[in-house]
């Protein structure tokens, strides 16, 4: 499941509240523990130094594009040729599977720009209707592109505290579906996107789902 070099998303949690979002990768593994590089804050880029017994929530994307999550605790700092952190690692059947064969899709309104590869044509500046790790749906007021056409995409993905990241990808037009008399739903799949950018989208979708579940419970 986990392997050396696997990228991890780590959140420090207090009760149900997320305090910090970090990223790291697996340095080494045993049956019961995982050793990770010192995590880096996603917003500041600074290394995060934990105290022992800090509670964390860890998620990763498997080789089969399935998101898994587990809660853990920082046990200690250790030297293995470099400074690493030791975390408890649960049994395989204790991992929480967040998504199965298909990507989780969430309805969301994000700014997006779609650029034809033919630079003489005008881009479409619009907003998303939904997004997943596999593609997006975009609102359009007319049919600008052809099915099967590839486009350069620039998606504005929000982070915390009014910060944003800009993700670029190559997408393929799948279809137009009419929503009403004056607008269309343009469905696009990602043909070429970096793993880190896809993971950022998957993580965004996952966080959106968690937030909506909490609102329903409150």
Image (spheres, rainbow, N blue to C red):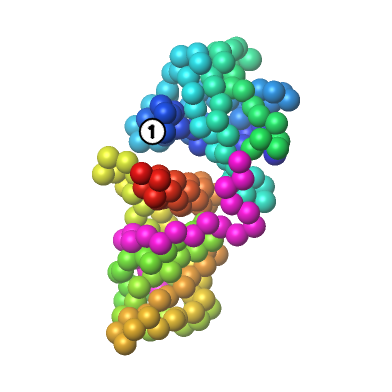
Image position, residue 64 (x, y; %): 67, 51
Of residues 90 and 41, which is closer to you in this image? Answer: 90
Residue under the image location 51 percent in, 16 percent down = 53
If the image is split into quadrants, where does the C terminus sit? top left
Question: In this picture, is 168 found above or below 6?
Answer: below
Residue furthest to the bottom: 181
Is 151 magenta? The answer is no
Crowd tier of the residue under label 1, counting other residues whose Cα lies within 10 Å: few below 14, some 14–19, many 20 or above = few
Where residue 26 sits in the image (x, y, percent)? 61, 30
Position of residue 110 measured from the top left corner of the image (x, y, whole percent):
33, 59
Outermost front residue:
218
Residue 80 versus residue 163: which sits nearer the camera?
A: 163
The magenta segment is 96-118
Query: Can you see residue 204?
Result: no
Q: Is residue 109 magenta?
A: yes
Relative to residue 118, is residue 63 drawn left or right? right
Q: Position of residue 21 (x, y in %)?
A: 42, 34
Residue under the point 71% across and 36% down: 92
* Residue 28 shown left or right of residue 44 in the figure: right
Picture quarter containing residue 13?
top left
- In front of the other: 158 or 147: 158
Q: Residue at x 46, y 14 (%)?
A: 51
Q: Secondary structure at mark 1?
A: strand
Viewer can see residue 57: yes
Q: Quadrant of residue 117?
A: bottom left
Question: In this rendering, is residue 129 above or below 145?
Answer: above
Q: Label 1 belongs to which residue? A: 17
The residue at 70%/37% (across/down) is: 93
Quadrant of res 19: top left
């Amino acid at each position: 499941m986990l392997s050396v070099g696997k990228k991890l998303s780590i959140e420090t949690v207090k009760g149900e509240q997320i305090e910090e979002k970090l990223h790291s990768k697996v340095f080494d593994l045993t049956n019961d523990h995982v050793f990770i590089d010192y995590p880096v804050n996603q917003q500041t880029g600074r290394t995060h130094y934990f105290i022992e017994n800090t509670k964390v929530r860890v998620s990763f994307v498997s080789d089969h594009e399935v998101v898994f999550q587990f809660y853990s605790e920082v046990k200690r700092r250790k030297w293995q040729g470099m400074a690493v952190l030791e975390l408890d690692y649960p049994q395989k059947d204790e991992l929480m599977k967040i998504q199965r064969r298909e990507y989780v899709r969430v309805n969301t309104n994000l700014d997006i720009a779609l650029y034809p590869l033919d630079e003489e044509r005008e881009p479409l500046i619009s907003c998303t209707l939904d997004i997943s790790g596999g593609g997006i749906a975009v609102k359009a007021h007319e049919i600008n592109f052809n099915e099967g056409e590839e486009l350069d995409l620039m998606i504005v993905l929000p982070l915390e505290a009014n910060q944003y990241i800009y993700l670029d990808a190559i997408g393929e037009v799948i279809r137009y579906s009419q929503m009403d008399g004056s607008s269309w739903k343009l469905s696009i799949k990602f043909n070429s996107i970096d793993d880190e950018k896809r993971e950022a989208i998957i993580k965004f979708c996952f966080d959106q789902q968690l937030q909506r579940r909490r609102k329903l419970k409150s």
